Image: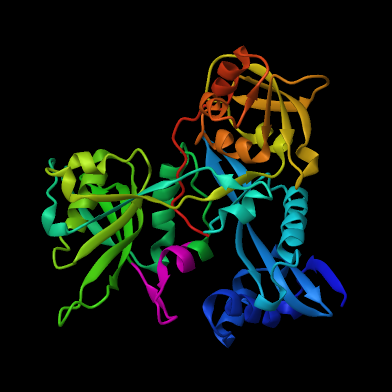
């Protein structure tokens, strides 16, 4: 058997739809083939072909990720698919390495993916580097402690995506984690959702307008059926996006959600530092769990640091040695310097102040893991004690990492 690893072409769409549907979604359909043709250029996907048959593929969707007021080229990975008969034969590993090479060539120095299989992707340098808080509660059980300022809600449809995007861009600009969104993403990934039946249905969207007529927030959600309980059919409100620019918008959007008092439950995922439980009379009525965050990876360290804004006002300088077998261009010692809002990395000789793997670098890069915590847990070897404070200063963030999207 001969195996070829390469980017897909337009002739491979039907095989890709069959492969991905078999691996994740059930049987392939003409609609799925058309969706691939419409939204995913073939060169975004690399595949393993066994005697001409596509048996595994990895897609990397180009985007940009915000951090400290800047934006860094980003590859959102997914799906990663393999036919059952060809698993555990090294195809996915080869494709992940090939995808990393192509990300670097295409100017995507960061990458992320969502998965329940951490051990697999950690072998290739991805690591959990952000998370979310998942709140669930009965709307009848919750009362806000404060009232919103005067304002109003206006319903928005798919053709209003630019109105929502203007609010989203104002929100995302200074933050750490939101992705750049384009029109197809708004229409297909934000303003629509998949039903268990396989149907694509529209979401509800509302814009919060303040007393001066300015758009200051929006919310996107849909109602989903829950398992039946006798004759009663329970349902929950699943929030897709909750974005506010002001306190008035924040409270106004919550007031709107809480009017859904016929719902059995409201389910929403928010940033780690969101204050919602402390905004209600009885916080113990709010159920909270840790929600899934993305596994992230620094694909090209030199370029990623050159694009990462520095939020401090000092001049930290240190050297770090990186181990990265899956992206060998990152291997070795680097001199890192931060000054006047920017960072640089250049090759260094001799010993390094700190030593770490690509897996540890990712959560430090996003601000999810502080260097001193990494050192205390054995994830970071320190050869010069003063370097820890300099490293912490260089990688400080203005906001904790949080992304509104899954991919």
Q: Which x, y percent locates residue 164?
A: 39, 55
Residue nearest the observer in this picture, 207 or 368: 368
Q: Quick check: can you spot residue 32?
A: yes
Side (left or right) of 359 relative to 319: left
Q: Say whether residue 196 is magenta.
A: yes
Using the rendered view, name the quadrant where residue 72 is placed.
top right
Q: Say whether residue 66 is magenta.
A: no
Colour scheme in the image?
A: rainbow
Question: Residue visible at 62% across and 48% down?
Answer: 126
Using the rendered view, name the quadrant where residue 102 is placed.
bottom right
From which residue to which does the magenta span run?
A: 186-203
Count of numbered circles on the image: 0
Q: Is 231 situated above or below 279?
A: below
Q: Is 221 situated above or below 363?
A: below
The quarter of the rendered structure image containing the N terminus is bottom right
Q: Which x, y percent locates residue 74?
A: 62, 49
Question: Residue visible at 55% across and 20% down?
Answer: 393
Using the rendered view, name the quadrant where residue 379 is placed.
top right
Question: Residue visible at 79% across and 31% down?
Answer: 332
Q: Is 309 situated above or below 284?
A: above
Residue nearest the observer in this picture, 21 or 177: 21
Side (left or right) of 274 relative to 300: left
Q: Which x, y percent locates residue 3?
A: 84, 72
Side (left or right) of 48 relative to 264: right
Q: Is 110 situated above or below 374?
A: below
Question: Residue visible at 80% across and 40% down?
Answer: 329
Q: Which x, y percent locates residue 264?
A: 19, 66
Q: Quick check: can you spot residue 16?
A: no
């Amino acid at each position: 058997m001969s195996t070829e690893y390469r980017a897909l072409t337009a002739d491979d769409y039907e095989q890709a739809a069959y492969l991905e549907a078999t691996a994740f979604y059930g049987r392939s359909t003409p609609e799925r083939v058309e969706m691939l043709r419409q939204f995913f250029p073939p060169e975004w996907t690399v595949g393993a072909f066994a005697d001409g048959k596509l048996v595994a593929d990895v897609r990397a969707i180009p985007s940009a990720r915000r951090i400290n007021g800047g934006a860094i080229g980003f590859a959102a990975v997914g799906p990663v698919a393999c036919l059952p008969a060809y698993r555990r034969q090294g195809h996915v590993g080869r494709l992940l390495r090939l995808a990393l090479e192509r990300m670097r060539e295409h100017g995507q120095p960061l990458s992320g993916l969502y998965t329940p299989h951490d051990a697999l992707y950690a072998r290739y340098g991805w690591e959990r580097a952000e998370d979310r808080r998942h709140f669930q509660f009965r709307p009848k059980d919750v009362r806000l402690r404060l009232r919103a300022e005067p304002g109003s809600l206006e319903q928005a449809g798919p053709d209003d995506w630019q109105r929502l995007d203007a609010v989203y861009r104002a929100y995302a600009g200074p933050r750490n984690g939101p992705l750049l969104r384009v029109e197809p993403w708004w229409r297909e990934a934000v303003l629509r959702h998949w039903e268990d039946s396989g149907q694509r249905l529209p979401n509800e969207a509302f814009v919060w307008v303040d007393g001066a007529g300015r758009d200051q927030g929006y919310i996107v959600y849909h109602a989903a059926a829950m398992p039946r309980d006798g004759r009663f059919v329970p349902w929950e409100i699943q929030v897709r996006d909750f974005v506010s620019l002001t306190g008035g918008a924040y409270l106004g959007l919550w007031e709107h959600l809480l009017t859904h008092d016929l719902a059995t439950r409201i389910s929403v995922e928010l940033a780690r530092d969101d204050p919602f439980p402390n905004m209600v009379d009885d916080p113990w009525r709010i159920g909270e769990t840790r929600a899934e965050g993305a596994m992230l990876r620094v694909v090209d360290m030199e370029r990623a640091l050159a694009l990462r804004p520095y939020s401090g006002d000092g001049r930290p300088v240190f050297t770090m040695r990186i181990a990265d077998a899956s992206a060998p261009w990152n291997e070795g010692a680097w001199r890192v310097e931060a000054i006047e809002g920017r960072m640089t990395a250049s090759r260094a000789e001799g010993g390094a102040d700190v030593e770490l793997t690509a897996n540890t670098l990712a959560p430090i890069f996003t601000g999810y893991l502080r260097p001193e915590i990494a050192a205390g847990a054995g994830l970071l070897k320190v050869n010069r004690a003063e370097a820890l404070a300099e490293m912490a200063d260089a990688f400080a963030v203005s906001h904790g990492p949080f992304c509104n999207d899954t991919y």
